[in-house]
Image (tube, grey):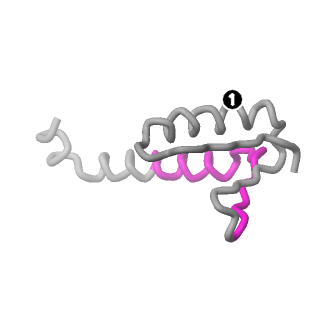
Amino acid sequence: MPGFSIRNPYFITVICLTLLVIGVTSLSRMPVDRFRRLIAGGGGRDVLYGMPPEDIETDITDPLERFFTLASGVDHMESRSMLA
């Protein structure tokens, strides 16, 4: 494989540029349905617009709670998933 790349540098360059163009095009056409906005000075508060509370709880809150319960010295943790 390295020998082929050294013998055909223009072919490899065209393949890389093609992949780059496909990636940028795909990224620009990808729909965005969740808009994240951090609240300044919110003590870990986070707001996601366009996402129901049930999805926030299962996709974001539960994994974060599981992660933070592994930390030592955590006496109390509270979270709420609600409509913003």
In the image shown, does 55 or 35 lie closer to the viewer?
Answer: 55
In the image shown, does 84 or 43 lie closer to the viewer?
Answer: 43
Please, is residue 72 above or below residue 1 in the view? Answer: below
Query: Which residue is at 63% across, 57% downward?
Result: 44
Kindly identify the amino acid type of the residue bearing the numbered disc 1: Thr
Query: Which residue is at 75% across, 32% downward?
Result: 55
Q: Furthest residue to the left?
A: 3
Q: Position of residue 74 (x, y in %)?
A: 50, 45
Query: Which residue is at 63% across, 32% downward?
Result: 62
Q: Is residue 9 left or right of residue 25?
A: left
Verify whether residue 62 appears in magenta.
no
Query: Which residue is at 15% across, 46% downward?
Result: 7
Q: Position of residue 40 (x, y in %)?
A: 69, 70
Return the residue at label 1. 58
Q: Where is residue 49 in the image (x, y as percent from the top left)?
A: 82, 50
Verify whether residue 21 appears in magenta.
yes
In the image shown, does 69 or 67 lie closer to the viewer?
Answer: 69
